[in-house]
Amino acid sequence: MTEPLFHRILIATDGSEKNRPALEEALRVGHIIPGTTLYAVYVIDTGTFSTMSGDIPLGDTYSVFKAEAEQAFARIRSQAGDLKVETAILEGRPAAEVVKFATKKKIDLIVIGTQGKRGLERLLLGSVAEEIIRSAPCRVLVVK
């Protein structure tokens, strides 16, 4: 019997509807291979804090991001069925944090969408996907 190709799949989520196809694909791949663990990560882009208006308290903004991450994770868990799911909220530059996490956890496959939220709430954009593709330590599946 051949060894399964993927044991650890990482889905980078920003909680947006645009990210849904990537999530669905990660879950589909995970369900095909018994014993797979799905790692869901949400990156709080700390770079957005430096471009924000001084009128918005940082603690409030961080709380909004954290609540959004937990909501995204709850959606993933509800769709995961019997698939093992681990979650993590990361902080920093999205692409760098996803790659660092993938390296640390020995991820076999990263699943990402081509674009996510925009403006103040932006987390995963086309340029982030491109950077992950270039520097990932494993295979990357990009879902439109």
Image (tube, grey):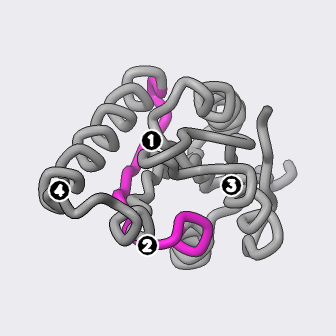
* Disc nearer the start of the sequence (3/1): 1
Q: Amino acid at mark 4?
A: Asp
Is residue 77 shown above or below 38?
above
Label pair 1/4, CB-CB below 8 angstroms? no
Q: Check if mark 3's residue and mark 4's residue have beta carbons within 8 Å.
A: no
Q: Which residues are magenta?
A: 80-97
Residue drawn where x is 50% and y is 45% of the image: 119
Query: Is 69 placed left or right of 140 in the picture?
Result: left
* Few, some or many residues within 10 Å of mark 4 (<14, 14–19, 20+): few
User: Which amino acid type is shown beneath numbered disc 3?
Assistant: Ile
Q: Secondary structure at mark 2?
A: strand
Is 88 in the magenta?
A: yes
Residue 76 is situated, as x and y percent measured from the top left of the image, at 44, 31
Locate residue 77 relative to residue 9 in the image: left or right: left
Q: Secondary structure at mark 1?
A: strand
Give the residue at x 46% y 53%.
41
Residue linked to disc 2: 92
How far across and how far down the image is residue 17, in percent? 55, 24
Query: Does the magenta run of residues contain 137?
Result: no
Q: Are marks 3 and 1 in contact (CB under 8 Å)?
A: no
Q: Which mark is residue 55?
A: 4
Q: Earlier in the sequence, mark 3 or mark 4?
A: 4
Disc nearest the viewer among 1 and 2 = 2
Badge 4 marks a residue whose secondary structure is loop
Closest to the camera, between mark 3 and mark 1, is 3
Q: Is residue 54 left or right of residue 13?
A: left
Residue of label 3: 110
- The spot of residue 120 in percent (x, y) is 43, 48
* Residue type (three-letter) at the residue carrying disc 1: Lys
- Residue named by callout 1: 84
Point out the tag, 1 or 4, that comes first from the N-terminus: 4
| Left or right: residue 112 compared with residue 54 | right
